[in-house]
Amino acid sequence: MVDQVTSILKEYSVHTDNKMNEIVESRKRVGHLYDMMKYHLGWMDENFNLSRASGGKQLRSTMCLLSCEAISGDFNKALPAAAGLELIHNFSLIHDDIEDGDEKRRHRDTLWKVWGVPQAINTGDAMDVIANIAILSLEDTVKPKVLVSIMKVFNDMVIRLCEGQYLDMDFQTREEVTVDEYIEMISGKTAALIEASTGIGAMIATEDADIIDRFKTFGFKIGIAFQIQDDILGIWGDPATTGKSAKNDIRNKKKSLPVLYAMQTSAEKEELKNLYRKETLTEDDISRIYDILTAAGSLEYTQSMANRYKDEAMSRLEGLYPGSEPMKKLHEIGKFLVERDY
């Protein structure tokens, strides 16, 4: 499955990259502002020489293109939207790196680490606006009323990203966070962008409200499942595959779904909460937390939640466009998001 999905993403990301580059290059040159964007996107190195560094998997933009193609048979008309979605995703990553203090992104120094926080904030803000400009260029493709609807979905998604990020940061300083609050947080921070990707792809291809709703709901639920799978890999993932140290999320005291479940249900929940109150965890602390999560059945609970959301997502596309190759590809990506091991 991994090879199939990698092939799909490579096939479509070339087109999205070309459209993003076209949009960025259309702007008047202002010092190195757009070069810093290109650095973050993997197109330039820190000396502003051409580069072929990783720009990410482009899952969201590809899901937008596939949704449009599955319905209409043509993904090209959705390319401005795919570019806008990929740019807004990267805008959020630039700001996430600043807020989290992360110094590495895709095995390179983060933008703020190279050029400082003020320039990184400004570059992220500019990328946000460029993303909106990309979406507005759909005026050559869709009816004006459809474009207005797409802009509403797009900007609602951006504010939901901000709301989700607020909750994520708020959770770091709160002792009590419920599973329901966590699902609300990832609904904004992770699922909203995937929901907008499949929804906008469908909106470009059809005005059938039921079909659009089915594609949007698919994206939303698979987005929840995607984040839950990340939570599993953050604790139980194989370091050789994930590229991260074992039990990484425990070490960083992340209040991910497995931890929150144990904090609510484990017989050792008070001990777990006390451990999470410590400023720094020792290796013995990490091992003890791991044992508490295991005894609480956190892995089994989290896996069942991921599979539930995946099944609900897939059911929304059931019966649509049988035999469609783009639909098959969309199904492959959906399954990959939940069944991946990295």
Image: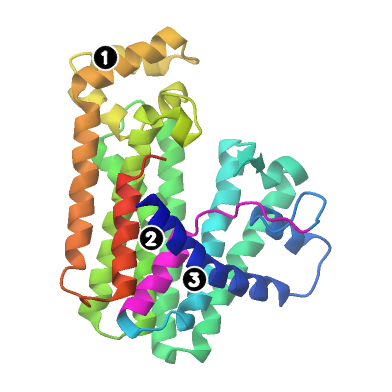
Q: Which mark is residue 194?
A: 2
Q: Which residues fall within the magenta stretch? A: 50-70
Q: Which residue is mark 3?
A: 82
- The mark closer to the camera, 3 or 1, is 3
- Residue depicted at 31% across the width and 57% down the height: 334
Task: Report helix, strand or loop for mark 1.
Answer: helix
Upstream in sequence: badge 3 or badge 1: 3
Colour scheme employed for the rendering of this structure: rainbow
User: Residue 261: x and y, percent?
Assistant: 24, 29
- Residue depicted at 25% across the width and 37% down the height: 179
Q: CA distance from mark 2 to mark 1?
A: 36 Å
Q: Which mark is residue 270?
A: 1
- Residue depicted at 77% across the width and 59% down the height: 50
Q: Is residue 121 left or right of residue 35?
A: left
Check if residue 66 falls in the magenta segment.
Answer: yes
Q: Amino acid at mark 2?
A: Ile
Depicted 33 relative to depicted 165: above or below: below
